[in-house]
Image: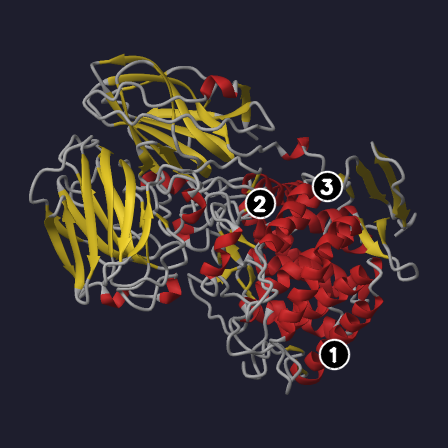
Amino acid sequence: MVCNSPLSYSNLQGFVVHGLGLFSVVNAIPRPVVEARSQTSYTPVAFSAGAAPVIDSLQPYSGTPVTLDSSTPVLTLDYAADVAGFPYFEVTSLIGPAAQIELKYSEQFDGLKVNTGDGPWLYTNGLMNSFRTETFNITTPGKTESFFIQGGQRWQTVELLSNTSITISNIGFRPSVEIKPSDSLVGNFTASNGVYDGLWSLGARAVQASCVEANSQPSTWEISGDGALIRGQYPGTSALGMNYGEYNMSFSTKISRGGTGWRVAAGPNAGYGAYFVLTSNGPQYLSTDNATVPSNSLIATYGFSIVNFYLSSASPLYYANPFPILDNEWYRVSTTITPSGYNISVNNTQFAFVPYTTFQPYVNAGFGGTNTITTGSWGFGPFQDQAAYVKDVEVIGQNGTMLYTNSFTSIDILAEYLVASNAYAVCLDGAKRDREIWIGDFSHTAKELAASTGRYDFIESMIEFEFLGQFTSASAAGIVPMQDSMGSAPQYQSVYYPSQYGETDYELFFLLTLGDYYALTSNTAFLSKYWSGTKLLVNAMLTYLDPSTGLLANSSASWFTAQGYQNATAPTALFATSLQQLAILANALQDPTTADHYKALSANLSTAINTQLWNPTLGAYSTALNSGESETSVLATAFAIRAGTANSSQATSAIQALSTLFYRIGYKDSTAVGNSATTQLSPNVQGFLLESLFLAYTQLNVTAEVVVPVLHNLLDVYWPRMLDQDEYFTGASWEYVYADGSPGIGMFTSLCHPWGGAPTYVLTGYILGVRRELDGVTGEYGWVFDPVLEVAEGLGLSWVKGRVPLNGGGWIQASWAITNGSVSSNMEVKEAEGVKVDVRIPSHI
C-alpha cells in the first residue's frame, strides 16, 4: 500500500528550513527525541510534474530527483493511502539565490485544487499543523523538515512559487504513527470476494493512523528563556481565565516571521472568541494572501479565525498600524476588554478600538464560546506561516488586581494552554480531524484494534486516561471526559465541564467499551483498578432515568443516539446492554450484589422500552415517546437487538422495516431525515446495525432470508464506496457519506475515521467466525470458531481465512471453505499457550 524506505530518525532530527535569505530565521529549539516503534519513512508511490495537480497518468516514484521550474511548477505526489507525520524533502540543486515552494496536503484529491488544501482546521489545536499548506524559502541545497505534524493525507503537492528552478528528491513524512499494510498486521482477513478484504482493511488502517503512542505528538509550542516560540496555528487558550471579564491582558512579543496572534474573551471549548493578528512590515511569503493578511496591520475578528472554513467566524476588521512593527524586535501588546469594545495598544500607543457591533451575532456558547463578548480566557497563536515569541503575560482586573502572571519560560504552561505533548497513548476521532479524544466513538475503535493490530494496550491506556479525568464529587460525580484534548491535563478537567460534555450517551458508550474490553480479554486484574469508578459512572447515569417512564430522560441531557430526543429507545437500550455486560464483570470481580443490581436495572430498561416504544403499526421501535408514531431509527433497531430487548418476531419485523430508511446506497439515521443531495448516511450508525444483524441471526433466531438483504446493502453497496472511487480513496474508513457515495460533509469530512470501520471486527467475528462468547453455564467468556455459514453463503462467499490477535501475544489462525455443500475448515493457535477455542463449525451446510 505504501512504499517504505529506511530512513534514520536521528538523521532527520533538528532539520529546519535552510537559508531563509531575507526572511528572519526561526531558531528551532531541539525537540525531545521520541522513541519510535518503526524506523521507516512514508514515501510516495507515484508522482507527476506539470502545470497543475493530476490524478491520472502518474509514474512510479522511487526517489528520482524532480526539477520544478516556471513551465513545470507543480509536483503531484500520491502515497496510495493515508499516511501521517512530519513532512520532509531534500533539495539537491537550486538555480538562483532563493526559491519559495508551497507544500499542500489533502486526503481527497480535489483538496489539491483548493488554495487551502482540504483545510484549514481552525477550531482545535490537535498538536498538528492547523493549516494544510505551508511555505518554505530555500537558499541552499539540503534536507528540510516541517516543524508540524500533518495528521492524515494521501495526496501532496509541491509547487514552485518563485521564478527560478529547483530540484527535489527524497520526499516524504517522518512517521508520527506506525501504519503497516493490512496483510502484515497480526490480524488479517481474506475472502473469496476481494471487496470484503478491502472493507476489513478500512478500519485497520484508520486505527493505525488515529491511535498515537504516548509522547509521540510533541507540543506545538517551543519553550526557552525567550518565552514561547509559537508558529502559525490555532491558538492555545489558558484554562485559568474562563470566568474572567473586562480585564486587561498584556504580553511581550517578538515577531520572527510575518506576525503574532492572540485571543481574549475566549471560551472553554478550544477557545472560540475574540482573535487578533498583528502583522509586521517584514518580507512576506509569495503565498501570502495580502488581502486577508496585509502587512503592518492589526486584524480583528470573533469566532475561530480570520478565515472561514466549514464553521464561520465574523468578518475580520482591519486597522493600519500607527508605526511600523519590525521583525525581531520586542513589543508590549495590551488588550483591554471594555463595556463597548476591545482596546488594543502596542508600547502604550493605541493601535485600534474594536467595537463589538459586528461581533455580537457570533457570540455562541454552543461553539464552545462564552455567553458574553466580554468574558473568557486568553490565548496565543499566530496565523498561517507566521511565527513569534510570547513571554511575560499579565492579566489585570478592573480594580487593578493582578489576576495572572506568567513568564512563559517553563514547559509547565503547556497543559494549561492545551498544547502539551500527549502523556498517554490515545485514539483520536480521526487522523486529521477531529484530533480530539471522543470517548463515544472509541466503542468501534476498541474492537477494530482487537481484530487488526492487536493493540490491546491502546484500549487499556484509553481506559486509564478516562478514569484519570473522572469527576469524583459534586454534581458531575462519576462523569468521565467525553471530548478531551491530547494537550490537556486532568487538573484542568473541571474547567471544560459542562461545555465538553454535550453528548450524554457518550458516557454510556464508555461503559459499553468497559464491558467489551472484558469480553475480549477476561482481564479482571486491570479492570478491578477501575471498578469503583465504573460503579460511580453507572450511578451518574442512573440520575438521568425518568421515574415516570423508566427511560432515559433529563432536561440537562442530550442523546446523540436519538437525535436529541428524551425518553428514546436507542440510548435506553444502549444503557441496558452496558449494564448486562457490567453485570458479568461484577460477578467476575466477586461483587454479586452489584451484578444482581445491574441485571435487574437492565431488565427494567428493556421492559420500559417494550411496553412504551414498540410500535406495532411501524413493526419497529419508535425513536422516542414524543418523536411521532411514524418515526423510527437505525439505532433504535440496532441497540434493541443488541440488548436482547427485542424478541425474535420483533427483531425480524424491525429489520424488515429498515427498508423505509434505505436511500440510494445506505440507511438514513431515522425516518425523520429527508432525502436530498446532502443527506448524511453515517457509517458509525450503520456499523452498529451491521453487528446487530449477526446478533439477530445468532442469538434471536432471525432467519438468513431476513438479514442477508440488509447485509448485502451494507457490505456490497454502501461500504464499497470507500473503496471504488480513486479521488476519495484513503485506505481508511470515512466519517460520513452522502447518498451519491461521496464524502458526507465535503472537504471537511474526515476520510480516516475509525468510527466508520465496523466491518473490520464484524467480518472477523462472524464471517471468519472467530470471536469471544459468554458461556451460559460458567459465566465466563471464551473463544469460539463458529462462522455464520448460511449468512456467508447468502452473501456469495465460498471461503474465508484470517488471523485474530490474542491479548498478550500470539493469534488464532482459521479458515473455512464450502465445496458442493461440504465444509472444510482449519483452526490453530499460534505463539500462545493455554488458549482454548470451541470449534463449532459443521461438516455440511
In this picture, residue 243 sits left or right of residue 7: left
The image's mark for residue 51 is: none
Which sits earlier in the primary sequence, circle 2 or circle 3? 3
Read off the residue under disc 2: 426
**Residue at the image position 64 percent from the left and 87 percent from the top:** 548
In this picture, residue 383 sits left or right of residue 15: left
**Within the image, what quadrant is residue 586 found in?**
bottom right
Q: Secondary structure at mark 3?
A: strand
**Which residue type carries mark 2?**
Val
x and y percentages locating residue 343 in the rendered image = 16, 56
**Residue at the image position 79 percent from the left and 71 percent from the top:** 599
Read off the residue under disc 1: 604
x and y percentages locating residue 8 in the rendered image = 52, 18
Residue 115 seen: no
Residue 203 seen: yes
User: CA–CA distance between discs 1 and 3?
Assistant: 42 Å
The image's mark for residue 191 is: 3
Task: Determine the residue located farthest toward the bottom in the rendered image.
Answer: 548
**Which residue type carries mark 3?**
Ala
x and y percentages locating residue 435 in the rendered image = 48, 47
Number of marks in picture: 3
